Image: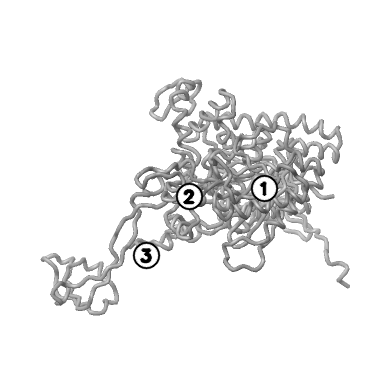
Amino acid sequence: MVKLPVIVGFGGINAAGRSSGHNGYRRMIIDALAKAEANQIRASLAALTGALHKHGSHWIDAAGETVDLQDYISSHGAELERGSLIRRLEKNLFDPDHLLFHKKASLASANGAAFQFNMAKKQVPHPLPSGWSIHQGGSGDEGRISISASENLDVLLRSYRSAKVNSAGQLPTGFDPATLYQSRNHPRGLQLTVFAASDAINSLGIDWETVRQSVAPDQISVYAGSGMSQLDYNGNGGMMQARLLGRKVTSKQLPLGYAEMPADFINAYILGNLGTTGTNIAACATFLYNLRQGIRDIQSGSHRVVIVGTSEAPLVPEIFDGFATMGALADDASLRKLDHLAHDELPDFRRACRPFGNNAGFTLAESAQFIILFDDDLALELGANIYGAVNEVFINADGHKKSIASPGLGNYISLAKATAATSKLIGEEGLRRRSYVQSHGTGTLQNRLTESHIISEIAKTFGIERWPVAAIKAYVGHSLASSAGDQLAASLGVWANGFIPGILTVDEIADDVFTDNVEFLLQHKEVGADGMDAVIINSKGFGGNNASASILAPHIVEKMLRKRHGATRIKKYKAINASVSANSAAYECSANEGTNSTIYKFDHHVMGRESIELSTTEINIAGIDPAIDLNLSNRYEDMCD
């Protein structure tokens, strides 16, 4: 009997805010919420960014003054909203108006004689460049010498430029993950990992020690990583730059730069996990590749608990440079042209990403997203919250290519298989009336053509008359490896509030977009909390990495569990879940009051050889009740004597 991978917790951070409690999703649809709930989201942003926190019964602002919460939100609500979602690039990561680069130059004396200059002895290069000769101490300073260069002197001159791209999906203004734990010069992607994974674990409503004591250590897996590794200065970026900038490479830059380091940090500093670990790297489809790995573990029965996620922090000048040079990003000039603005007018940075509309490129973003999966039996046993379940994830390559970045046939296959799998589970009528697509929807010309054709053709094939299509990158931008995680977090929110976020940055669908049998949602679509039985999440990555996932609604999951486990078991589950739900609500309340619950356990209960006991039948780990079973079956018994 195949186990069902049930989503029992989720958390993260992106430009819309904190993911758990559906906060980030609700920021996207804030204009569709009732006033009280909208104000709650504004208060959540204030607490997240350090603008407010609750001390006892009083609210305290960043200046340490006691304030009335409602008065504060009335006065600062618009500012809090402006400081989230896609917006003009801020200067907390780097100054886009003052980007360092080195310009080549060749120096020579004006009259053709040797070029003379003074420099510090410790700065003299070794070996001495061709044509250089050392003459004497310079200006009576024993620490300096005089140099003559008989040949032209090639130098790199420190220069500065302004960025051509000034829009990004940045984390909310004021939020700094480095201040929430002992970050010790960690790359930003790992800082996001610690916060986001902590958010997911805290959202469980079940103490992690309870989970750990409920399953064997080898039945927990963590699949998490980044698509581009850690490329800021504290990671691989600094390792590559340091010598060229006249600095030293640190001992942390290389090891902390690995793409699978988010999983390593979760294992070592958050969970103390001894089970399976790793990551799949698949460009912009990385989250779904990891998700497929995780659900295979649960479906096969080899694992009972899986944490799946990605963390991407690509807002560094070099990555902007790379994508802009490819013509993939919506630069300021292109945005002005779209809106018929003069060259000295500021573009509408908020509307930089325009999926399926007249657009100019995607908008780079940072994000970390994590979900926690239990098998269905464990979910009932522990009374876990049920946010949905993963039916299937399909992955297909593109075949032969001319350009490695160009799309091919793979996404037709992956999306068609996800659609077919969804239909098999919720029925043809459910597929046609109660499913929708969370598109990849990057905001590029190529994506609007290729993905719209794929969705349209599959809708026709399966008899879907008007398939709703969302594209949340219009709000949070393209976080590369984490993009499908952003899509999944938003999808879980639809089953809480009943609104599919509209593509509000687009006034009309572009003329070349395929629209047959498709409903591109240019406004929020109210469907009700139980109105959609499934969502198909689509992801397309550079190089031909295509993935599509079939995600089931919580009300569908409960029906499935009732059929498999019976009414009596479900009744018992509901009783246990009451306290779990209360714990999750308590975490949500504390987070919205500014309490920092980030988990980081450095040098915590480190185990050595004294903590493990081996036998031919099992492995016992000190402090963990379930043993690791060594009575393994021989899968190739029919091939053995």
Q: Residue at x 42, y 49 (%)?
A: 332
Left or right of 233? Residue 417 is right
Mark 1 or 3: the one toward you: 1
Name the N-terminal-most of marks 2 and 1: 2
The residue carrying mark 2 is 188
* Horizontal and vertical percent position of residue 502: 60, 38
Mark 1, other Cα within 10 Å: few <14 / some 14–19 / many ≥20? many
Expressed as whole percent of the image width and height from the top left, the position of residue 585 reads 63, 30
Along the line of sight, the residue nearer the viewer: 96 or 126: 96
What residue is shown with label 3? 243
436 or 151, which lies in front? Answer: 436
SS for tag 3? helix
Instruction: Verify CB contact (< 8 Å) between mark 1 and mark 3.
Output: no
Identify the residue at horizontal 57%, vertical 53% (top origin): 481
Residue at point 53% right, 59% down?
A: 258
Instruction: Using the rendered image of the protein, determine whether residue 449 is visible from the camera's viewpoint.
Output: yes
Up-down relation of residue 316 to residue 386 (above or below): below
On screen, 41 above or below 618? above
| Element marked by disc 2 | helix
The residues bearing labels 3 and 2 have C-alpha atoms spaced at a distance of 21 Å
Dot 2 alpha-carbon crowd within 10 angstroms: few under 14, some 14 to 19, many 20 or more: many
Which residue occupies the foreground of this view, 240 or 584?
Answer: 240
Q: Which residue is mark 1?
A: 537
In the image, residue 298 sits, relative to residue 179, either above or below, namely: below
